[in-house]
Amino acid sequence: MKPRLIAALLAATALASPLAAEPSSIDFATQAGAAEASPFARFAPAADGREHRIDYAHWDEALGWFVVPMGPSLRQQPTPIAVNTGSRRVYGHDSRYRLEGNRVAFSYMTPQIISALGEYRADLERVGSEMDITRLPRNEQLAFWLNLHNVAVIEALAKEYPLAEPHERQFGSNRAALDEAKLVTIAGVELSPRDIRTRIVYPNWRDPKVIYGFWHGVIGGPSIQRLAYTGDNVDALLALSGEEFVNSLRGVESWGNRLRLSPVYEEAAPFYFANGDALRTHLVQFAREDVRDLVTRTQAVAYKPLERDIADLQRGEVEPQHNFLTQTDCKYESCAGAAASLNQSGGPSIRVNPAIARLVRERREKLDRARRAGIRTGMVIYGDGEYSEGEAAREVE
C-alpha cells in the first residue's frame, strides 16, 4: 500500500462513527472526589459495562504498511559489521539487538502521513473524551489505552525524525523526555506514555502481560505489532508479544549467576512482581526451554540499561552514499513503503539508504537460519483474533 493511500485512510478516519456507541452523558468534572485525589482515578474501569466496540481497521492497515517484522530472536550475537573502505564509521544500526524487535519505517513517512497520524491521534482523544471509556468491556478499554499510547509515541517520533536516540530530544506540550512528555489529553487530563502505563493500565489490570503491549520507540523495549489491538485479539496478541520479548536477548539474559532483565520489568515490578519468585514465575510462563533453564538456575536479578537506539530501519542516519535495494533484497519483507513499488513479477529497483539495505540483508539471513533450525518465524492469530460463534473472547484480568 502506497504512502499516499495510507495517509488518505488515516486522514479520513473518524472513530466516533464506527463506535456503535452513544456518547456518554457523564460529566467528568462531577467526579470531584476521585479526581481531586488523582486525576487518573476517573479512568479506572467501572463495575458495570456496556457492550460497545471501537473499530481500529484503519490503524490496522497503517501498521501493516509501516511496521517491518524482524522475526523471533535467535539469541545470537549478529556478525560484526564491515566498515566501508577508507572509513571507520558504521552507519545505521550496530547494536547487538539490531535484529530483534519489529521496526517502524519512519524514513518512508511523508509529511502528509505524519499529519494524518496527528489527526488519528486527535480522533482517539475525542473518543476518550466524549464517551465514558471506563464503561466499555475491559478488553475494549485495554485495547484503547494500548493503541492510544502507541499512536502517540509513533507520531511524536515521526515529527522529530530523523533522530538516532529518542532520549536526546524533548517532546509534548511540556517539552520533556519521551516517557514523561504530555502527548495526549483525555477528558481534560494531559497524559504521558508513562502515565498511561503506570497510572491507568498497570494499577487496573492484574495480568502482567499487559506490559508487552506498550511500544517505547526504542529497540530495547517490547516490539510494535503489525496488528491494532482490539477487544477480541488483545489477549492473544499480548501473549505473542510476551513470548517474543521474554525469549529475546533484550528481554532476558544472564551474567554469571545473575539474571539480567530489561528495565521494563523494573517499571512494572511495583504492580506485578512483589519479589523475584513472582517475576520468575511470570517469565517461565512464556520462556522456551533454554530461557526457562536460564531463569531457574540463576540466583539473583538485575536490571540492565534500556537499549536507546530508535526502533527504525536506519537509526535515523543517512549514509553519504546510496545504492539500490532490489526485489531480491525484498524477498521476505515489504521493505515498508519501498516495496509498494515492486511487484511479484519484477519491478523497478528502489533507491534506498545502504544502512537499510544492510539491515534487510541481515534480517533475511537471520530468517533463513531460523527456518533451517525449525524456528517459527511468524505469528498466526486465526480469524484475526475473532472467536467462534458463541465463544466469548478471553478477558485480560
Image (cartoon, helix red, strand yellow):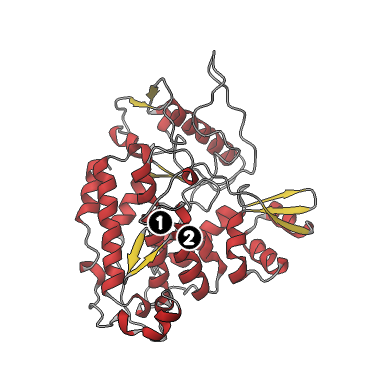
Residue at (56% x, 21% y) in the render? 83
- Secondary structure of the residue carrying numbered label 1: helix
Left or right: residue 341 versus residue 215 is left
Residue at (57% x, 22% y) in the render? 82
Task: Say which quarter of the image contains residue 24.
Answer: bottom left
Amino acid, disc 2: Gly
Q: Looking at the image, can residue 269 be seen?
A: yes
Q: Nearer the viewer, residue 107 or 143?
A: 107
Horizontal and vertical percent for residue 80? 62, 28
Q: Which mark is residue 150?
A: 1
Whether the residues at callouts 2 and 1 have beta carbons within 8 Å, the answer is yes
Q: Which mark is residue 213?
A: 2
Amino acid, disc 1: Asn
Q: CA distance from mark 2 to mark 1?
A: 9 Å
Horizontal and vertical percent for residue 347? 29, 27
- Secondary structure of the residue carrying numbered label 2: helix
